[in-house]
Amino acid sequence: MSLEIIESCVNCYACEPLCPNEAIYQAAPHFLIDPDKCTECLGDFDDAQCTSICPIEGAIVDELGVALNLPGSLTGISAEMLAKYQAAVEAAYQAALAAKAG
Amino acid sequence: MDLPVINSIPSSGEPAAGGGCASNSCGSTDDQLGHLPEHIRAKVHNHPCYSEQAHHYFARMHVAVAPACNIQCHYCNRKYDCSNESRPGVVSEVLTPQQAVKKVMAVAANIPQMTVLGIAGPGDPLANPERTFATFRELSEKAPDIKLCVSTNGLALPESVEELAKHNIDHVTITINCVDPDVGAQIYPWVFWKNERVMGREGAAILIEQQQKGLEMLTARGILVKVNSVMIPGVNDKHLAEVSKVVKSKGAFLHNVMPLIAEPEHGTFYGLMGQPSPTAEELQKLQDACSGDMNMMRHCRQCRADAVGLLGEDRGQEFTMDKIEDMEIDYPAAMVKRAEVHAEIAKELEEKDNKARAAKAELVSIHGMTPSAPATRPVLMAVSTKGGGVINEHFGHAHEFLVYEASGNGVRFIGHRKTTPYCEGGSSCGDGETALDETLRVLKGCEVVLSAKIGFEPWAPLEAAGIQPNGEHAMEPIEEAIAAVYEELRAAGKLDEKPNPQQKVA
Ligand code: SF4
Ligand code: SF4
């Protein structure tokens, strides 16, 4: 039973000192959790500490690979909002390319 | 005891307490340091973040040793970088405390003007107490001639006061955007508090309580506290006058209102929601409104968390970690050199003080009236400078303009306005057109712009925008030049014309 830090981690160090089991360690390209040490904080805290401070939605997942902080839950920026914005940027970029070519 | 750059009220020593015309927007607002108690003023006199005058001569630097944060702000994107006064999108290199100490000493040895080290991010310094305090501890020992400051969101402040006091850190900046949890709920989606993530209004209420408590604890111990606020139109703009009042009553010595910077490409909540940033005019209006209650700071440049250098410059590239590793630093020797340079600057500053005071007296006597009853309207003028307190930057090369207000009471500094240089100095000016538009926009409200040199092209557009270009005072001290131009305007009868409405409305 353990959590996992995945590639969207931004290496902010916030989780590392909070772990009651010293399961979190700095690694390249991002922080990692030692699955043998992680207890998901059971017996120590109501909430998994790393998951409770991590600012990046989706950076920490459970054993099934399910994100513990869902998109939009921390920043208020929903997946739709982000997608819309990315589409707009892409469109502007394509338009600029087309203008240059034409 | 006058600091000369900004006007002060020569005849009365009273703090500008209540607002109103005489103490507020008619040009007689006190400068930001003028009414501080002597012991506080002594502490901040040569501090580039607090003294506009010192800003031209001394330098500050920040080191990024504190990556973790314990709250989320809607103007910050943790995927890039943060600091309490975040400019998202700028990634700084996170240093270990040992690397930070080495970097600071290397910079201090090479740039003797560097007098202040700040830790301001990229997260919250007090959310990284070990890293932050290890840096301070080693520096107080090895480089005692460097002042230390720390900038925090305040959540972990009460528990850190003891430790801060121990390291003799005499300047703390708290970013306080609100004192009302309902406002806070629109700025802070969550805080991490007592092993839990606390969302929304409840989280904001905890943050506010901790900020206020920390502020009181620090001032009770005689530690200087500056308060930064980010002005977010439609969210806390109306509320910040109240914030100013509250933090002043709790002993903060300066309040610095900064504009929100929010662009969609920053990927912040505000950026993506299209939350507008305040215009330079809106910002100034709010600063004026708050200054009736508080010493306002107007020269903050929201410098990057890892910036190095003087004024708007950034010499960070000279001090990257790989370059520093090879440097041999004899700090005791450097300290001797530094002391000499500091004494030199102090002398220069003092001479300038005296000169400016004389210039002000002259201006007042020309007008033949008491300083508290200005008969001529105040005029905003912009200046381009590379530092040293003189007009020595070309119009087209300026990354920012310093805005001053000239009135019958003298010359006071109002703030910085950043822009993209009209001409980057290359052979072709490329985007010159749009950059000039941007410059015209940031200079709105100014009637004169003084530069070391102003090219032919921007001349007509400037005039058309009601801004008189002036290249006649190159290399002259800023305040003297502005006073001279003001006097010319007065002699030409231009100050009797309809007053600029922005200037008169309090
Ligand atoms: S869930 Fe708890 S025990 Fe597991 S890594 Fe996170 S903080 Fe450590
Ligand atoms: S808190 Fe999240 S982003 Fe920060 S280091 Fe830990 S896993 Fe990575």
Image (cartoon, coloured by chain):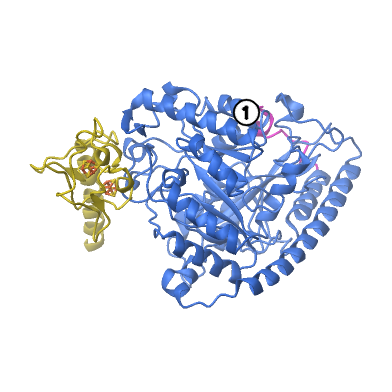
Q: Which chain is yellow?
A: A
Q: Residue B208, how many percent across, how many down?
A: 47, 28
Per the picture, the main secondary structure of the magenta-coloured stretch is loop
Q: Nearer the viewer, residue B57 or B130?
A: B130
Q: Residue B407, how many percent across, how many down?
A: 77, 40
Q: Residue B259, how many percent across, how many down?
A: 50, 40
Say whether residue A13 is magenta: no
Label 1 secondary element: loop
Q: Nearer the viewer, residue A16 or B69?
A: A16
Query: Would residue B59 appear left or right of B350 to someone viewing this image?
Result: left
Give chain B's shade. Answer: blue
Say whether residue B496 is magenta: yes
**Which residue position holds label 1?**
B250
Q: Is residue B172 visible from the viewing direction of this image? A: yes
Quadrant of the image containing the C terminus of chain B:
top right
Query: Does B303 appear above or below B18?
Result: below
The chain that hosts pointer 1 is B
What residue span does the magenta drawing correspond to? B493-506
Q: Is residue B6 visible from the viewing direction of this image? A: no
Question: As shown in the figure, which amino acid type bears the numbered disc 1?
Answer: Lys
Q: Residue at x 66, y 74 (%)?
A: B333
Q: How many marks?
A: 1
Q: Residue B6, how many percent across, how many down?
A: 74, 44
Q: Residue at x 26, y 56 (%)?
A: A96
Q: Nearer the viewer, residue B244 or B169?
A: B169
Q: Nearer the viewer, residue B195 or B276?
A: B195
Query: Would residue B447 appear left or right of B124 to someone viewing this image?
Result: right
